[in-house]
Image: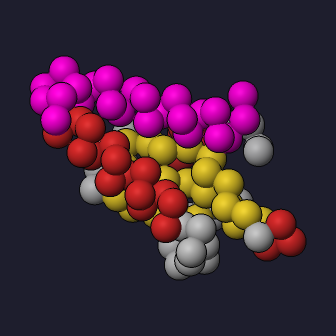
Amino acid sequence: MSGRQRAVRHLEEIFTYLNQQSPSAAARYVAELKQACERLGEHPEKAPRYDNRYRALVFRNHVVFHRFVREKDKVLIIAVIDARRDVSAILEKLSDC
């Protein structure tokens, strides 16, 4: 699974979970999270490095792990993870995209 596919799946899971409590809040949260991801394209290196592979953008309870590919001038979203989980363990399971 590509990083993009994984990130889209993560957004869908976030929406599904939040939608159970409040559909309007779920839609708003995911829309704002998507906007934060889109802004990475404007300032791809603004978010701090998490490790030697990824940068991490914190958005409320979630962390958007991404990589900036300078030679392609492209931001690759790798994963969107709830920061209250064991983030390191989850990242270890991801294939290097």
Residue occupying image coordinates x 29% and y 50%: 61
Answer left or right for 8 relative to 14.
Answer: right
Work out whether residue 78 can be spotted: yes
**In which quadrant of the rendered image does the C terminus lie?**
top right
Q: Is residue 58 above or below residue 18?
A: below
Magenta residues (range)? 1-24
> In the rendered view, how is the structure colored?
secondary structure
User: Does residue 95 show up magenta in the picture?
Assistant: no
Answer left or right for 34 relative to 78.
Answer: left
Quadrant housing residue 93: top right
Please state the horizontal and vertical placement of residue 80, each as a whole percent of the image: 48, 44
**In which quadrant of the rendered image does the N terminus lie?**
top right
Task: Name the one closer to the observer, 73 or 69.
Answer: 73
Work out whether residue 52 can be spotted: no
Q: Majority secondary structure of the magenta segment?
A: helix
Q: Is residue 20 above or below residue 76?
A: above
Residue occupying image coordinates x 27% and y 46%: 29
